[in-house]
Amino acid sequence: MKSTVSIALASLTLVFAAAAQGEIYKYVDPATGAVEYTNQPKRGAVRMSTGDTLSEIGTGNKAAKTKNGAATTGTASVNGRTVNASTNASAGTAMASVDAGTQKTRDGTRRQVLVDELASEEKLLNEARSSFNEGKPLPMADEGVGSPKYIDRVKQLEKTLRVHGRNVVALKQELANLKL
């Protein structure tokens, strides 16, 4: 009875791990507008659509081992599809490589995601620059130019400018590093 419960719990763990493998969340900080991508759910984050392919891409990790040294395996249903829940045991070998067409498609998709994110970050950076007004943003109705509330808002705008500026630089660098 005890081993049946252990097996059931192990199987359930594999199912949840496989289901969570392909989940990506996008969180936008309401105060700064900073965008964060994570695989961990977070309050206010939106689950991204992965096109049902992310969970099938190998992670490059070696297969997990149980106490007796056997590799863990299993299947799970992710987005209505059955996928292998084991880790990529062939990572780093010739078996792990994909054909040129598949890789080209993946690279093209990656480039498009980066281009879209760059456009979004550049837009947010321009909006932040406009709000910052060269260090002298217009005060809100309930603020005076020297009030603590105004000074805090100016500091927050400066921080937002730095974050979006770094994001734009990083995305441009990532695009420049792509091999196509």
Image (tube, rainbow, N blue to C red):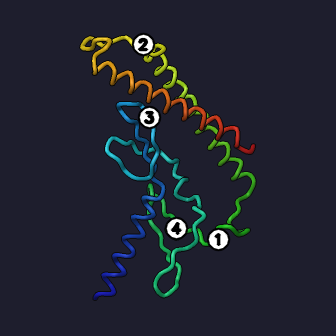
Q: Are marks 1 and 2 in contact (CB under 8 Å)?
A: no
Q: Label 2, on which residue? A: 136
Q: Secondary structure at mark 1?
A: loop
The residue nearer to you, when weighing 95 against 44, is 44
Would you call the spot at circle 2 few (<14 residues within 10 Å), some (14-19), or many (20 or more)?
A: few
Where in the figure is residue 95, as x and y percent of width and height? 70, 69
The Cα atoms of the two marked residues, 1 and 2, are separated by 57 Å
Three-letter residue code for mark 4: Asn
Q: Label 1, on which residue? A: 90
Where in the figure is residue 8, as x and y percent of width and height? 34, 78
Q: Secondary structure at mark 3?
A: loop
Q: Label 3, on which residue? A: 34
Q: Secondary structure at mark 4?
A: strand
Query: Which image quarter holds the C terminus?
Result: top right
The Cα atoms of the two marked residues, 3 and 2, are separated by 22 Å
Where in the figure is residue 102, as x and y percent of width and height? 69, 53
> In this rendering, which labeled residue sits more in front, label 4 or label 3?
3
Three-letter residue code for mark 1: Ser
Say which quarter of the image contains residue 99: bottom right
Q: Are marks 4 and 2 in contact (CB under 8 Å)?
A: no
